[in-house]
Amino acid sequence: MPTKTSTETRAFLHAHGLDVSPTDLPPMVETAIREIMATLFPEDILSDLPQAELEVLERGGFDTRPRRLRRKDPLARTIAGYAALLETGLTTREASERLGVNQSRIRQKLTSKPPSLYGIRIEGKWRLPLFQFTLKGIVPGIELAIANLDSELHPLAVYRWFTIPNPDLQVDEEPLSPLDWLRSGNDPEVVARLAADI
């Protein structure tokens, strides 16, 4: 598959309403953009409306023009964050090497009910976000929290929940993120209960 030129990449981004200018955009990021944009802004959503309804919307102040995203637009940041999760995530092979098990065991942990590893399946391949790993293994107790996560949560929401300080997880009156709570050797059941509520 030939590599896209920077002009083609820029055209792809602009066609999807993103006013950003990366020098190189991997195919995985393009897939992420397509998925997010298709979910948030389905194509031709306004073309399905009768002209009379469009006119009513416009008279009511609804902007029917295509949305253009600014550089600091929250959606652009979400896309960038999601792309970063995908790009920095481990493949099943890399995860198997890190955990010292074979790839089939990694896939089993990802697909078991409930799962004990967190992964994002995209174009038939798994990416396992780095937040759940240590240099030579997995964050102690994180499997319990992963098992309690709602499978409908967006991967970025999962990442943020694990990494932002939580007022329910305090040590010496200092809130810790669920990840820091687990890394500090605190009770994983507490994080697992909180995970069930997000």
Image (cartoon, grey):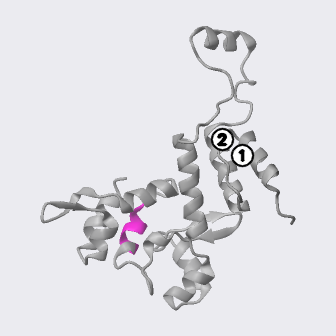
Q: Is the magenta stretch mostly helix, strand or loop?
A: helix
Q: Mark 1 points at which residue?
A: 13
Precedes in sequence: disc 2 or disc 1: 1
Magenta range is 143-149
Q: Is residue 12 highlighted in magenta? A: no
Q: Name the residue under label 2.
A: 19
Relative height, residue 164 to residue 136 (above, below): above
Which mark, residue 44?
A: none
Q: Residues within 10 Å of mark 1 (few under 14, many from 20)?
A: some
Amino acid, disc 1:
Leu
Q: Report how far apart the C-alphas of labels 2 and 1 lie in the structure.
A: 7 Å
Helix, strand or loop at mark 1? helix
Badges 2 and 1: C-beta atoms under 8 Å apart? yes
Instruction: Pinpoint residue 127: horizontal percent, then vertical percent.
Output: 59, 70
Q: Residue at x 34, y 79 (%)?
A: 140
Instruction: Pinpoint residue 159: horizontal percent, then vertical percent.
Output: 44, 60
